[in-house]
């Protein structure tokens, strides 16, 4: 099983997190400008996400495995973004939610040939 989809999903989620939450640092900017900027960033995100899923699927990953992996990557990227950029602290609730998602991933990957 190739790790290329994982690396592409990480890149994809970095751009998507910036598109979805980066504007929170610029609350004085007009909403329509933020929307257009976010669309542009999301287009770059798609350039990573679509190949990640295509490559993963054609190299033995199931659609479920790709989706659960994407969710884990999303949480990790968002946690880093929230703490480093938005200066929001992470607590036990975040850790518990993350553990549940990792558990879901285990169900998707364990026992699959």
Image (tube, rainbow, N blue to C red):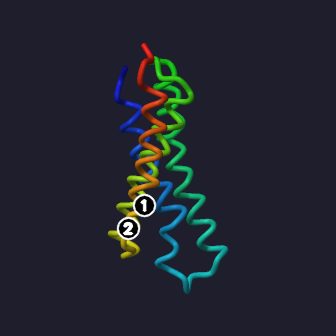
Label placed on residue 91: 2
Picture coordinates of residue 43, whole percent (x, y): 56, 50
- State whether residue 23 is above or below residue 48: below
- Asked if disc 1 and disc 2 are in contact, CB closer than 8 Å, the reply is yes
Q: Quadrant of the C terminus?
A: top left
Q: Residue 79, located in which quarter of the rendered image?
A: bottom left
Q: Residue at x 51, y 75 (%)?
A: 24
Label placed on residue 21: none
Q: Residue at x 54, y 36 (%)?
A: 67
The answer to whether 9 appears left or right of 32 in the picture is left
Q: Residue 6, located in which quarter of the rendered image?
A: top left
* Count of all numbered marks drawn on residues in the image: 2
Q: Residue 111, located in which quarter of the rendered image?
A: top left
Q: Could you tell me how far apart the alpha carbons at marks 1 and 2 are, in whole angstroms? A: 5 Å
Front-lying residue, 48 or 107: 107
User: Which residue of the protein is positioned furthest toward the top in this rendering?
Assistant: 113
Picture coordinates of residue 86, whole percent (x, y): 40, 74
Q: SS of the residue at dot 1?
A: helix
- State whether residue 108 is above or below residue 71: above
Report which residue position mark 1 lands on.
94
Q: Residue at x 37, y 67 (%)?
A: 90
The answer to whether 36 appears left or right of 96 in the picture is right
Picture coordinates of residue 37, whole percent (x, y): 56, 66
Q: Quadrant of the N terminus?
A: top left
Q: Residue at x 45, y 35 (%)?
A: 105
Q: Callout 1: 10 Å neighbours few (<14), some, many (20+)?
A: few
Picture coordinates of residue 68, whole percent (x, y): 50, 38
Front-lying residue, 90 or 73: 90
């Amino acid at each position: 099983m190739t790790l290329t989809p994982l690396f592409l999903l990480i890149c994809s989620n970095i751009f998507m997190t910036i598109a979805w939450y980066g504007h929170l640092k610029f609350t004085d900017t007009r909403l329509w400008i933020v929307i257009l900027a976010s669309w542009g960033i999301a287009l770059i995100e798609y350039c990573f996400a679509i190949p990640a899923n295509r490559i993963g699927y054609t190299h033995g990953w199931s659609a479920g495995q790709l989706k659960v992996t994407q969710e884990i990557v999303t949480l990790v990227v968002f946690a880093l973004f929230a703490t480093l950029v938005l200066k929001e602290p992470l607590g036990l609730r975040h850790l518990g939610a993350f553990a549940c998602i990792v558990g879901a991933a285990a169900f998707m990957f364990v026992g699959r040939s």
